[in-house]
Image (cartoon, grey):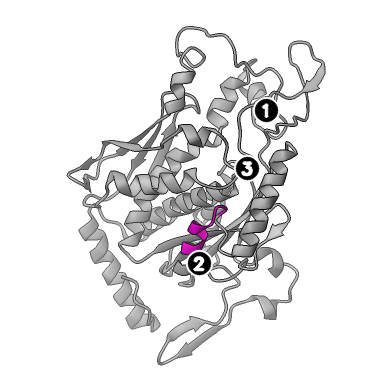
Amino acid sequence: MLRLLTAGESHGPALIAILEGLPAGLEITQADIDKELQRRRRGHGRGARMAIESDRVRIVSGVRHGKTLGSPVTLMIENRDHQNWLGIMDPELPGEGKEIRRPRPGHADLAGGMKYNHRDFRNVLERSSARETAARVSAGAICRKFLGMFGIRIYSQVVSIGEVVSPTRGQKLTPELHRRADASPVRCPDEQASARMVEAVDRAGKEGESLGGSFEVAADNVPPGLGSYVQFDRRLDSRLAAALMGVPAIKAVEIGEGIEAAAQPGSFVHDQIRYSAADGIFREQNTAGGIEGGVSNGEQVVMRAYMKPIPTLYRPLTSVDIESWQEEKADIERSDICAVPAASVVGEAVISLVLANELLIKLGGDSVDEVIGNYRNYEGYLKKVWKWKRTLY
């Protein structure tokens, strides 16, 4: 139903996102999108690039008078730093300088160069850069607005940076926890853990190091029935995991308490199904993270993503110069010390994209009014047949 295509290089003129499949009539403004872009820019440990970029979106197509038209929505985010790279990034004339000949361990440099036969690894890093995630955040902001019409809310928090782990890890994400996370310089809602994370990032910066960590993303009020068990590629957990793994530097994804559950007996792990006249059908725990058999079960959808340290180090690791074939220190490109807080915001965006798509697959509809009508019909079915007590819309 929804299709997203992004384009643009890190130091090119702009980033582009084209989102196709949105129903007509969804209210969306530049301010809705810019709000999420500004959240992505923040975070203790970000590099100098974020002081240059304002990250303001321009809606190029698909929206008129504040509402989607049903046609593809095109979004453009200007790269202000492009003015400093005009000769180097010129699409026609060759420029001098800024070539990357010593690939950086942990980046796409060498593997991408081998794949596309690039001898200057800048041709790889310009697109493989996490700068591209600004385009995904802009599209995710629209999907977040769409989900909000049905009471679906997306939250996140950073739960670890380096060796510092927040005591809020595993707690149910709530609007209050999300608000406290946004108020933290590292998006960790626990003040003491947040302060220790800031200290760890500062220490890593002084040592020429970088730090990774983990974050949680949760979606509240997701209706049961999204995704499917009938084919592996239609499983909701599969699609959510793929979306999070597609965020640069994410190396592992967990649904619910997947890692801890692997070490526990089944009687501790599986969420028992209960019923009462007052609450209807419900669960007392949510170890499954709101997904069973690839299908949402009505509980909060919970994911955890693990991010490796940023590969560009100001104390570079050993590499090979591909002209002399001598071992040398890797090239240095301006970079963050820690990007886990920004990655958590990107995580919210990509999860919003998946859930909006799954909601449209389930309900169908070419206009917002049609989708809302279909949603109300589905809600009525759940209440009548399955004793569902919670209000979805």
The circle drawn on residue 177 is 2
- Label 2 sits on a secondary structure element that is helix
Residue at 67%, 45% in the rendered image: 202
- Label 3 sits on a secondary structure element that is loop
Q: Is residue 302 above or below residue 280?
A: above
Name the residue tied to disc 3.
Answer: 249
Q: Is residue 136 left or right of residue 251?
A: left
Q: CA distance from mark 2 to mark 1?
A: 40 Å
Name the residue tied to disc 1.
Answer: 111
Sequence-first tag of 3 and 1: 1
Pick the residue in front: 80 or 386: 80
Sequence-first tag of 2 and 1: 1
Magenta segment boundaries in residue numbering: 179-186
- Residue most toward the right? 327
Amino acid at dot 3: Ala
Q: Position of residue 393 (x, y in %)?
A: 31, 70
- Residue most toward the left? 65
Residue at 55%, 33% in the rendered image: 48
Q: Is residue 167 visible?
A: yes
